[in-house]
Amino acid sequence: MVSLPANPLLRLAIDRWQVRSWASDTRSGAHTEATLADLVLVDPSLLHLSAGDARSDADAVGGRSAASSQSDALTASAAGGTTEIVVLHADSSSHDTGSTYIVRMNSGSALVQSREAATNCSVAVNRVACLRLLHGDRDGAAVGSAQDGRSQPVAGLITGWSGTGDSSEPLR
């Protein structure tokens, strides 16, 4: 939406997005990327900051399909990628369990991350709402989400959904 004029020192883009889709007789797919703010100092290998970053992919071949998504609130990368910090992360894949975490440095362990996702709510108001924190399963992942009493999503913080959504829960 907005970007600085090209220069060798600083690259800044606000509300950047990219969408691609393709189809043939036997295969179809789509890829999307969106970033709220993207900042590069001199070169991406020196310092790269992004905020509100989300990506998703979908692919269908014959009768099979696959989907994945990933969302990060903040990513900082420096020194050619040898130092990386990711804050508020959620990822989901139709062929694997989704995961979430609060913060991770480099490829090490994350601080406060989802383990085996529980299907129950972190906080439940009987037949009114279900709040989930650090939730991940085959249908999706969310750092935080809220559902109404019929298990319909109503709000989410750093979420990614790749499943069918057929796994709705009964009223609580």
Image (cartoon, grey):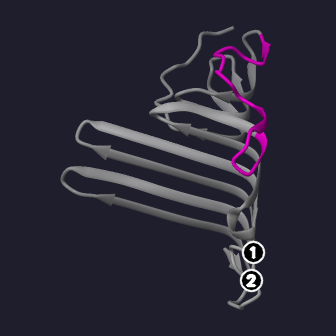
| Residue underneath mark 2 | 42
Q: Position of residue 109 (x, y in %)?
A: 74, 39
Identify the residue at image location x=50%, y=43%: 68
Residue under pointer 1: 46
x, y percent for residue 148: 69, 22
Q: Tell me the kind of residue under disc 1.
A: Leu
Q: Nearer the viewer, mark 2 or mark 1?
A: 1
Q: Secondary structure at mark 2?
A: loop
| Residue 60 picture quarter | top left
Q: Is residue 137 above or below residue 61?
A: above
Compared with 25, 155 (above or below) is above
Numbered mark located on residue 103 in the image: none
Q: Quadrant of the N terminus?
A: bottom right
- The residue located at (65%, 48%) in the rendering is 71
Is 120 inside the magenta-drawn segment? yes
Cα separation between marks 2 and 1 = 7 Å
The quadrant in which residue 24 appears is bottom left
Relative to residue 102, is residue 165 drawn left or right?
left
Q: Check disc 1: other Cα within 10 Å, few if <14, some if 14-19, many if 20+.
A: few
Contact, mark 2 vs mark 1 (Cβ under 8 Å): yes
Mark 2 Cα shell of 10 Å, populated few (<14), some (14-19), many (≥20):
some
Residue at horizontal 68 percent and vertical 14 percent from the top: 120
Q: Is residue 85 magenta?
A: no
Total label count? 2
Secondary element at image label 1: loop
Indicate the position of residue 123 as horizontal and vertical percent values: 80, 17
Coordinates of residue 19 in the picture (x, y in percent): 49, 63
**Which residue is more in the foreground, 124 or 115?**
115
**What is the quadrant of the C terminus in the image?**
top right
Badge 2 amino acid: Val
Question: From what the image shows, is residue 107 above or below residue 118?
Answer: below
Q: Which residues are magenta?
A: 102-125
